[in-house]
Image: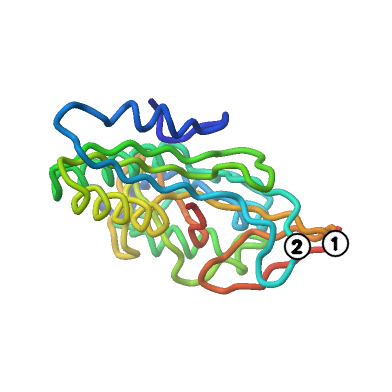
Amino acid sequence: MPAPTTQLVNVRVLLFASYADRLGLASVRVALPALATVADALDHVRSLPGGEQIPPRPLCAVNLAHAALDTRLAEGDELALLPPLAGG
Amino acid sequence: MAFLSATPIDLAALIAAVESPVHGGIASFLGQVRNHHDGRTVTRLEYSAYESMAEEECANIVAEAEGRWPVRVALQHRVGALEIGDVAVAVAAAGAHRDEAFAACRFVIEEVKRRVPIWKKEFYHDGAVQWVDPSRAAREVTHP
């Protein structure tokens, strides 16, 4: 029986504004272990060059809705890391 | 009408979208580009957005306002390059009476600021550029 933890969850991470500037990227694809959360994806992005400048608990959204760090990620999800909002 | 606009906002069009014979009170709010921030002179700015989520979140906010008060609401926010005095955001709320119109209008602009993924890059008179962080003013200043 295959161990479910060997399956990977592929997630597209979007970066905006100051976060995109810091990493020099607007998006990055991340492959995470099954049962991974937003926090796991965030750890990966923060390990990239420039990623340490993203705060440990940024605003996040999964599939266009605000999401908490413990939100479980599924195959094909779109995770957005949102700098402090400044609309209005 | 999309909630995000790359072209100038027309408040009259927003009011036309919400007015009707049953509405006796229309409240509106305009946010304009200011020429100063934290004591520094702002010359222009750029708004960027996570557009798909911003559209969704604006629709949610309007639906919440229309569910909470007997009103019709129109909302638009600019993206792209803006000059001083340009309208950055506009809200129009129409109700039978002024109380619900004012309340809904206030709710919508506050929720836009709190929830909609839009970012503002300010360009200063001294050549510096900064992404505005309302939670921590005067930060991330970069000089060219």
The image shows residue B139, relative to residue B51, as above or below, that is below
Front residue of B129 and B92 = B92
Quarter of the figure with the C terminus of chain B: bottom right
Q: Which mark is residue B126?
A: 1
Judging from the image, what secondary structure is the residue with disc 2 in?
strand
Quarter where residue B47 is shown: top right
Q: Are marks 2 and 1 in contact (CB under 8 Å)?
A: yes
Q: Which mark is residue B41?
A: 2
Q: Residue at x 53, y 67 (%)?
A: B134
| Amino acid at the residue labelled 2 | Thr
Q: Residue at x 47, y 55 (%)?
A: A81
Q: Residue furthest front?
A: B24
Quarter of the figure with the N terminus of chain B: top left
The image shows residue B143, relative to residue B9, as above or below, that is below
Residues under labels 2 and 1: Cα distance? 8 Å
Q: Viewed as shown, does residue B97 lie left or right of A11?
A: left
Front residue of B66 and A6 = B66
Q: Position of residue A75 (x, y in %)?
A: 33, 42
Judging from the image, what secondary structure is the residue with disc 1 in?
loop
Q: In this rendering, which labeled residue sits more in front, label 2 or label 1?
A: 2
| Amino acid at the residue labelled 1 | Asp
User: Do marks 2 and 1 both belong to one polypeptide chain?
Assistant: yes
Q: Position of residue A7 (x, y in %)?
A: 33, 47
Q: Position of residue A19 (x, y in %)?
A: 59, 57
Q: Residue at x 31, y 27 (%)?
A: B17
Q: Position of residue B97 (x, y in %)?
A: 17, 46
Q: Chain of mark 2?
A: B
Q: How is the image coloured?
A: rainbow
Front residue of A52 and B37 = B37
